[in-house]
Amino acid sequence: MSGSETGRRDGRGGATESPTVALADIVAARERIRDRIHHTPLLSSQTLGGRIGATAWLKAENLQKTGAFKARGALNRIESLSPEEKARGIITVSAGNHAQGVAWAAAASGVRATVVMAETASPSKVAATREYGAEVILFGPSTIEAFAEMERLQRERGLTLIHPFDDPAIIAGQGTAGLEILEDLPALGRGLAPDTIVVPIGGGGLIAGVAVALKEQRPNLRIVGVEPHGAAGMYTALRAGDVVRLDHVETIADGLAAPFAGALNLALVRRYVDDVVLLDDATILAGMFFLLERAKLLAEPAGAAGVGALLSGAVAARPGSNVVALVCGGNVGLDRLAGYLQALTGEG
């Protein structure tokens, strides 16, 4: 691992000592949501495999409902609410993908949703969240301020919180993507099991759930998380041994720009994840460009971080191994996409 960020301890307390999400919870989540989400494809990439010296696979969660894995956890959480909690209405905070997942799941379940997003959130993600039926409140220049406003509104309005990552039901829902990888790869890979899974990290809900789903069944499998240098909440928390709120977040990967890693997420990562590495924005964009040009997949920067890590060598593939990069989202507006492509190609 390399790099670090500084911050202050989160007043909510440190990581829990014992994980509270088990494989059985993830299996139950799959049964609860499987008829309403996509079982996303696991795609081979010979070009990526040739560059990293391994057999490469892409778990295409950019093709999930609402364009990201977030629909899994949001639906599982909302479907787990009591009638009283649903009646009060729900609230969340998000850079955009969780916002869309919650808005979609709330509409599907007949629940009123309020979503707080930073004023700098992607216009396309804001528009999509509103189109799914949620009330969107734009507040502050980053997710740091948006989190604080969400907490204030939750208290003021008495709404039920759907946390974007630090919640057992959210984590269990995200973990269903891991179950699909283990189901699909042996058939596609002629009986081969995965050796390494590379997972992007924002607040840590995805990697926590996937890690439980995979490591409880394949203890020797290697799981590596990737985070931006400018939003290294999990990396910093692992070194501090406690949840740390970052004083500043800045990355092109808005889907990974959580201001802290969740306490439960941290506990699960400490138990199940083998390594967490940091990436600069150029490496993330290189992964995005590769997916678009060679795999014909449109991924947002957050979704391409795992591929960028493999291409750059930040995550080294063992020669001849079976490697899966989780492409966690594809929600990128056309205006931002044009800017990213210009930056990558040097045009414009």
Image: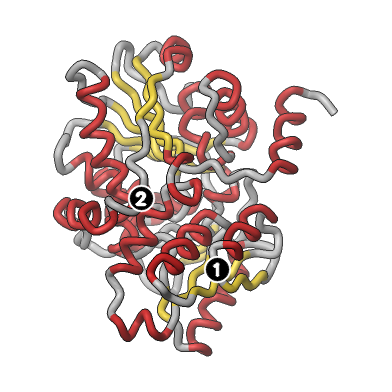
Residue 143 percent location from the top left of the image: 59, 63
Q: Give the quarter of the image for residue 40.
A: top left
What residue appears at the point 34 percent right and 56 percent down from the top-left corner? 265
Q: CA distance from mark 1 to mark 2?
A: 18 Å
Residue 139 percent location from the top left of the image: 67, 71
What residue appears at the point 40 percent right and 36 percent down from the top-left corner? 326
Residue 37: give its label.
2
Residue 214 percent location from the top left of the image: 22, 40
Tell me: residue 169, above or below residue 154.
Answer: above
Residue type highlighted by circle 1: Gly
Q: Secondary structure at mark 2?
A: loop
Q: How is the image coloured?
A: secondary structure
Residue 269 percent location from the top left of the image: 31, 49
Q: Earlier in the sequence, mark 1 or mark 2?
A: 2
Residue 133: give its label.
1
Numbered-mark total: 2
Q: Is residue 278 left or right of residue 79?
A: right
User: Circle 2: is it few (<14), some (14-19), or many (20+) Cα within 10 Å?
Assistant: some
